[in-house]
């Protein structure tokens, strides 16, 4: 499974403005709703809110991975956002988040969710890729950097 297989350029925003965690999540979710109208916005936002209320998805090192498993999602849907100035995400290291990858999973796919989250976390914590991503100026750049990294690493 390649992360790039689930990326759609219309679901990538390289210029998110640092407002707050809720607005960043909503903006990225909206990108998915526009690209994939079968996803129920109420269910999706509710799932994300519920997950964030358990524990912040800010995993440290400037990265957050908000996610939810929902009925209206039939395959993985991903949105990516860069917040170049950083935003408070209540991350585990108390550092601002600059890279957010929001993921919806099919409700019944627990194993897929765990494998995907582990892979995304591992990829994003690679310093060389992370630097390229944070300097991206277009959605095409983000997609290309991730594809190239996956190709090199034989994921």
Image (cartoon, rainbow, N blue to C red):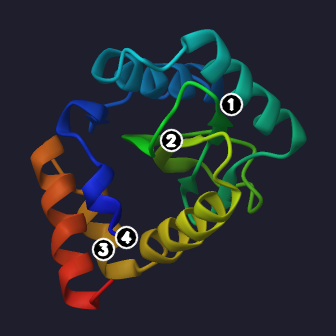
User: Which residue extends farthest top?
Assistant: 42
Q: CA distance from mark 3 to mark 2?
A: 18 Å
Q: Secondary structure at mark 2?
A: strand
Say few, some or many: other residues with alpha carbon within 10 Å of mark 2 (under 14 / 14 to 19 / 20 or more).
many
Q: Earlier in the sequence, mark 3 or mark 2?
A: 2
| Frontmost residue, 80 versus 36 | 36
Residue 72 vs 140, above or below: the answer is above
Which mark identifies residue 102? 2
Q: Quadrant of residue 84?
A: top left
Q: CA distance from mark 3 to mark 4?
A: 18 Å
Which mark identifies residue 129? 3
* Identity of the residue drawn at 17% across and 42% down: 139
Residue pointed to by mark 1 = 48
Say few, some or many: other residues with alpha carbon within 10 Å of mark 3 (under 14 / 14 to 19 / 20 or more).
some
* Identity of the residue drawn at 42% across and 18% down: 38
* Disc 3 versus disc 4: nearer the observer: 4
Q: Is residue 4 left or right of residue 20?
A: left
Residue pointed to by mark 4 = 1
> Where's residue 103, x and y in %?
51, 43
């Amino acid at each position: 499974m390649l992360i790039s297989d689930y990326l759609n350029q219309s679901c990538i925003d390289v210029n998110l403005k640092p407002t707050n965690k809720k607005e960043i999540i909503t903006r990225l979710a909206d990108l998915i709703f526009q690209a994939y109208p079968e996803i129920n916005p109420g269910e999706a936002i509710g799932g994300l809110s519920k997950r964030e209320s358990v524990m912040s998805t800010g995993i440290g090192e400037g990265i957050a991975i908000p996610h939810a498993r929902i009925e209206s999602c039939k395959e993985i849907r991903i949105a990516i956002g860069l917040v170049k100035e950083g935003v408070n995400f209540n991350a585990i290291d108390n550092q601002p988040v600059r890279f957010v990858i929001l993921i919806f999973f099919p409700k019944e796919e627990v194993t897929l969710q765990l494998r995907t989250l582990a892979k995304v976390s591992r990829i994003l914590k690679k310093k060389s890729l992370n630097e390229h991503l944070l300097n991206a100026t277009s959605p095409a750049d983000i997609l290309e950097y991730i594809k190239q990294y996956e190709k090199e690493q034989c994921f």
